[in-house]
Image (tube, helix red, strand yellow):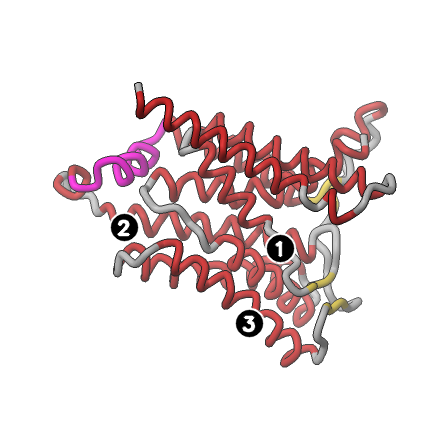
Amino acid sequence: MYIYRSTIVTLAMIMLPVLGGMWTLQAGILNISQEGAMLMAAFFAVLGSYLFSSFWMGLLFAILASLVVNLIYAFFCVTLRANIWVIGMALNILASSLTILLLKSIFGVKGSFTSEKIQQIPIVHLGNLGPLNGIFNDFSLIVWITVALILFFKYMDSRTVFGLHLKAAGKNWKTLDTAGISSSKIKYESILINAVLVGISGAYLSIGYLKLFNKDMSAGRGWIAVAAVIFGNGNFAWTLIVTITFGFVDALGISLQSSGLNSNLTLMFPYLAIIIALIYQGVKSTSKNED
């Protein structure tokens, strides 16, 4: 049960940027800046919640911070057609350095900040469910929002015109432009939707089950989301399966760490899973090309 609950907690942090990242990939642009955007969102969630003693303001600040990062990314990568890896890495490094600077400038601390004034995102209790208490009760509001968004994204992805436009923007953007629909606009929309989800994920990271910001606290979760998106290759079902697997492996590592296994080893688990998944994907793609 501990591993199950840890998996759900970790999964929500990864699933939100994965859902948005899947749409940006379908639109023809992989969002590399998710790690930096998540970190900025986590910091500004703490700042907003601290200033106004409201988790709603924390969420709003987080989403706005993520939108700024992603708008910069979209401007360079969509409008100016710059290299996505160069811009993404630059923004990720900038976010890491900038949050440390802001932590020192605003709160006067170097490593981490917490305060009683920070309001946590509420935990949802569904009442006495008997043997199902451990399965459904006492998860963060963000977990249930994530479940609803998975269903919403599945519907939008497969049964709406917008879903078709996303795929057309990635596979044949010239045809889409010829039809009078701006492929650049579709790319911007997908990145901004992704930004909102990354913002929620960052807020969940810092004011979900915790009430603090710690430098580089995203700890590679944005990169895990990028890896899941790459492996899923725009396919909703595969992306979902891979994300759940990564979430489980991460939770398993935490569980084994509490059992006495070396923490440096357990922290490697999700990244080893990513390497294995990407190697598999690469071998699979090579085989298809040879055929």
Q: Tell me, for residue 218, which label it has, or none.
A: 1
Region rendered in magenta: 159-174
Identify the residue position indicated by label 3 in the image. Answer: 98
Residue 143: where, in percent of width, then height? 65, 40
Task: Give the left or right position of residue 31, taking residue 274 as reference.
Answer: left
Residue drawn at x 55%, y 27% as measured from the top left: 241
Q: Quadrant of the C terminus?
A: top left
> Disc 2 vs disc 3: which is toward the camera?
3
* Distance from the alpha carbon under mark 2 to that under mark 3: 29 Å
Q: Quadrant of the N terminus?
A: top right
Residue 239: where, in percent of width, then height? 49, 32
* Distance from the alpha carbon under mark 1 to that under mark 3: 14 Å
In the rendered image, which quarter is residue 134 located in? top right
Q: Earlier in the sequence, mark 2 or mark 1?
A: 2
Determine whether label 1 and label 3 are within 8 Å by CB.
no
At label 2, the amino acid type is Lys
Residue 28: where, in percent of width, then height? 32, 42
* Distance from the alpha carbon under mark 2 to that under mark 1: 29 Å
Residue with the most extreme top position: 291
Question: What is the secondary structure assignment of the residue under circle 1?
Answer: loop
Question: What is the secondary structure assignment of the residue under circle 3?
Answer: helix
Question: What is the secondary structure assignment of the residue under circle 2?
Answer: helix
Check the image and report above or below for 136 versus 145.
above
> Disc 2 vs disc 1: which is toward the camera?
1
Q: Earlier in the sequence, mark 1 or mark 3?
A: 3
At label 1, the amino acid type is Ser
Identify the residue position indicated by label 2 in the image. Answer: 185
How crowded is the residue under tag 2: few (<14 C-alpha within 10 Å), some, or many (20+)?
few
Which secondary structure is most common in the magenta stretch?
Answer: helix
Check the image and report above or below for 290 versus 69.
above
Residue drawn at x 53%, y 30% as measured from the top left: 240
